[in-house]
Image (cartoon, rainbow, N blue to C red):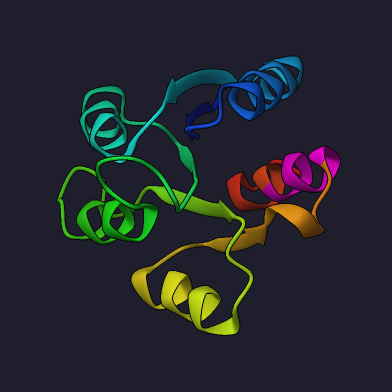
Amino acid sequence: MAKILLVEDDVNLREIYSARFAAEAYEVITASDGEEALATSVRERPDLIVLDVMMPKISGFDVLDILRSTPETKDTKVIMMTALSQESDRLRGESLGANKYLIKSQVTLEDVVNSVKETLGTV
């Protein structure tokens, strides 16, 4: 069973996505800010991180940058899921090493689930 770390500061979104991923038989762990995300990713070694960008303490961009420069997490797959829809934001996410960059207002719950499956190679 693949393990997903869901990093989302919005409680409602965190609950909705957690329930949906669990329904797909993924093991789901959560973090509500960037600092917690970094500690959890090193401790839990998830197969995939679904990472919000605008969060308390450490932004998703900074989290991704740190993940990519940390030996234990440098190869962890990361899907950024954010409200930031500017092309420059998408390019920044990709240049930092995001596997996918999803804009919350442009994707459905099913789109996110499908992106998780694609990224994990379980389609």
**4 left or right, relative to 22:** left
The part of the chain drawn in magenta is 109-115
* Residue 28 image offset from top left, x and y in percent: 53, 19
Q: Is residue 16 left or right of residue 59?
A: right
Quarter containing the N terminus: top right
Q: Position of residue 79 (x, y in %)?
A: 54, 52
Task: Report the magenta stretch's main SS.
Answer: helix
Specify whether 8 is left or right of 96. right
The quarter in which the C terminus is drawn is top right
Identified at 46% across, 63% down, the residue is 98
Question: 94 and 1: which one is in front?
Answer: 94
**Residue 72 included in the magenta stretch of the image:** no
- Tell me what residue is drawn at x 68 percent, y 60 percent: 103
Residue 23: % across, % down: 76, 16
Residue drawn where x is 69% and y is 17% of the image: 25
Against 41, residue 1 (above or below) is above
The location of residue 18, given as percent across then percent down, is 63, 21
